Image (spheres, rainbow, N blue to C red):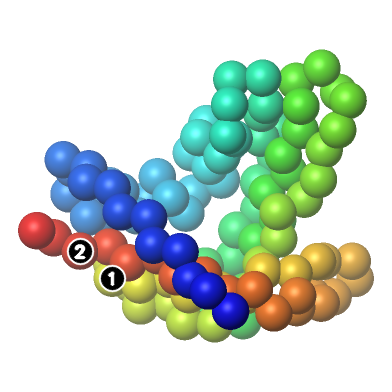
Amino acid sequence: MASITVTTIIDKPIADVRNAWTQPEHITQWNFASDDWCCPTATNDVTEGGVFVWRMEAKDGSFGFDFTGQYDVVEPMSKLAYTMGEFKDYFVPAGRKAQVLFEKI
């Protein structure tokens, strides 16, 4: 499977950036692709084996879904790796994987 790399530079301390990436009260402020979408709720257990569920919805209510994953690797202040999937009463992996690296440059 092909991989995609996205890079961004944020002029803030790594601890601040990681906090904004992992805390539900911050996730609901940035987790949407355009201004006509929102993220009304987010849960995030940032531990290895922990699950996150971030609700994404069109603001007009026409569509919504849960963006869900389970953390495979949690290295404080440096790396989060997770498998995307679906959460019902338990996590069902879909096989797609992602990782987020926090690096000081």
Q: Residue at x 90, y 71 (%)?
A: 89
Label placed on residue 103: 2
Above-or-below relation of 15 to 37: below
Q: Quadrant of the N terminus?
A: bottom right
What residue type is disc 1 on?
Ser
Q: Are marks 2 and 1 in contact (CB under 8 Å)?
A: yes
Q: Under tag 2, what secondary structure?
A: loop
Q: Residue furthest left?
A: 105
Q: Pick whichever of labels 2 and 1 is earlier in the sequence.
A: 1
Residue at horizontal 59 percent and vertical 65 percent from the top: 45
| Towards the viewer: 85 or 26 | 85
Crowd around label 1: few <14 · some 14–19 · many ≥20 (10 Å): some
Q: Position of residue 68 (x, y in %)?
A: 71, 60
What is the three-letter code of the residue carrying label 2? Glu
Alpha carbons under labels 2 and 1: distance apart:
6 Å
Quadrant hosting residue 53: bottom right
16 or 66: nearer the viewer: 66
Using the image, tell me which numbered label, if any, was put on residue 78.
Answer: 1
Q: Indicate left or right for 104 with 85 as reference.
A: left
Horizontal relation, residue 87 to residue 38: left or right: right
